[in-house]
Image (cartoon, grey):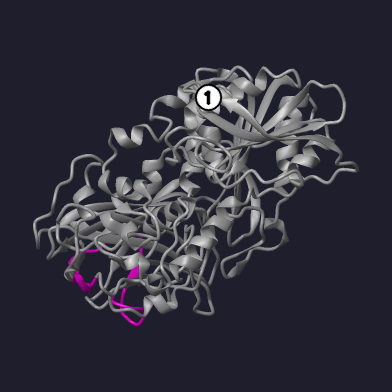
Amino acid sequence: MYLRLRNCLILVMATACLLPITPVVAQEDACVFEANVVMAMRDGTELAANIFKPMGDGPFPTILSRTPYGKGGENNPQARSYASQGYAMVIQDCRGRGDSKGLWDPFRYDAEDGFDTQEWVGQQPWCNGKIGTAGGSYVGWTQWAAAPQGSQYLKAMVPIVPFCNAYDNAYDGGAFQLALMMGWGAAVGGARVPPDKSLDAFRFLPLNRFDDQLDKEVFYLEDWVRHSVDDDYWKLRGIGREAFDDVTVPVLNIGGWYDIFSKVTLEMTNRVRSESNNRAVRRNQFAVIGPWAHGVGRSKVGQLEFGPQAAMNIGQLQKKWFDYWLLDKDTGVEEWPAFQIFVMGENRWRGESEWPLARTQYTPFYLHSNGNAADITGDGLLNDAKPGTSATDTYSYDPGNPAPTAGGNNLGGAPAGPFDQTRVEQRNDVLVYTSAPLTEAIEVTGPVKMILYAASTAQDTDFTAKLVDVHPDGKAYNLCDGIIRARWRDSRTKPDLIVPGKPYRFEIDLWVTSNLFKPGHCIRVEISSSNFPRFDRNPNSGLAFGSDTELLSAKQTIYHEADRASHILLPTIPR
């Protein structure tokens, strides 16, 4: 069921290397190309960049991309296309990558190096003093990392599937995003897994020695495990919780409901809209969120086809943005809605002025059963009636046999997007709660949260929740999911183990979605304790994170009664 890690690493690199841009076709792509132009950073480290310039004297507005995935050569179609349309383009290897000098320590130097590079480019005689930044994934991060630094030359950004704080990538609800961090981290560190260990690489223990199975040391993998709290280490690898007021540049963020950075894409847009010191900039923050995973612009994602309306030429959208801010062309940008979202199920785009939507009605849907909700054949029921006296549901969580990741917001290790969940729902460690078939459509658009009352025989364990759209043919497609590690239920910095057998209230963040549950469909919630290899397996021991070499089973109890009414809180939208 699980991908071999070596193949997974190749997949992660291939996915992340792509700038998900369709070049704008031009009549002529002749340009002046300069390879490996050296730029000295403030500490003297020399970074290398390829520069593409239009034919002619200039000066020109400039598009900048800073990447750890290789800047390529002179036949870059996107760069040549921009050059043919009056833009210079600079593609730089990040510190310690490609032809750039220095230490490759992911996330650590991109804020300073990004600012220094923007200052260098802005002062070149061929640049007219206007810089736009572009690129996706880590290349979206390099844009956001430098934005609060405030280069006078930075005039516009288009981060695609971006993020802004590395800690949030590494840990979600206190659980480690294993496939993302270890898969991507090893690959971009130039490591590979020996063939005899590739199948079970993600199962390797102890986690703090993960790179023992690699063919070379990747020092930061151990650092990421050792720093399991949001401490000073991570503060040097994020833009800072208070940095959004210093962002004074128009930004077009592009993401997808099934992307690993779906939630943060919307959060960054909101933060600048509410906190920037520049009033005009607050109005010029936009987000486009499609039904996509990490590769944006497609109509088919996972196992679902969302129709031709879901396909989008991201290159044309980006070009309109840059033409407006860097060439002063009227491309209609000011008429764009602040949030352009794709409503799945209905499969259409809709413009909104805020996120979450002001008209949202947060509606609880409660868990019910007679104590037999385990697997898809059980009696788990979901509706809007608060339970009275009700039986509990129990299951055994064995980290040696974890519930597998089946689609969702993944990058490497497992496929991303919507996938039929019925095989996962046949497991006896997955509780399934399903509504009656709907007689009227229900739209769910916004942040989704699970309030779960649960107990465990362990001192520390995990609980997961997943929102699912059950189609009339019985296929059940995941929309969003989340996880909580018990010791981190109340704090990101102060762990607190639980008392075995004692019920606790857990709040599980399922991130965001937009979906129309049509008549005849059912709303379903899955409850379990693992989602592997997206997240690491909780060993149930309560020991220091990453140190476990043994896995213990735990018995989990889920409550749904009057004073412990477990429920999912859905952001329903009146229609």
Find residue 33 and report its image quarter: top right
Residue at 79% x, 45% y is 24
In the rendered view, does 543 fall on the left or right side of 157? left
Disc 1 residue type?
Met
Rate crowding at label 1 as few (under 14), some (14 to 19) or many (20 or more) other CA atoms within 10 Å: some
Find residue 14 and report its image quarter: bottom right
Magenta-drawn segment: 373-398
Q: Was residue 132 drawn as part of the magenta stretch in this picture?
A: no
Q: Which residue is mark 1?
A: 41
Q: From the viewer's perspective, is residue 439 above or below residue 76?
A: below
In the rendered view, does 524 fall on the left or right side of 138? left
Q: From the viewer's perspective, is residue 221 above or below residue 234?
A: below
Residue 272 visible: no
In the rendered view, does 492 fall on the left or right side of 55? left
Q: Was residue 393 drawn as part of the magenta stretch in this picture?
A: yes
Q: From the viewer's perspective, is residue 508 above or below residue 336?
A: below
Where residue 67 appears, as percent x and y from the top left, is 57, 41
Foreground of the two, 96 or 284: 96
Q: From the viewer's perspective, is residue 568 above or below residue 372?
A: above
Look at the image and tell me in which quarter the N terminus lies: bottom left
Residue at 43% x, 31% y is 239
Foreground of the two, 99 or 316: 99
Magenta segment, prevailing SS (helix, strand or loop)? loop
Residue at 50% x, 23% y is 44
Foreground of the two, 280 or 149: 149
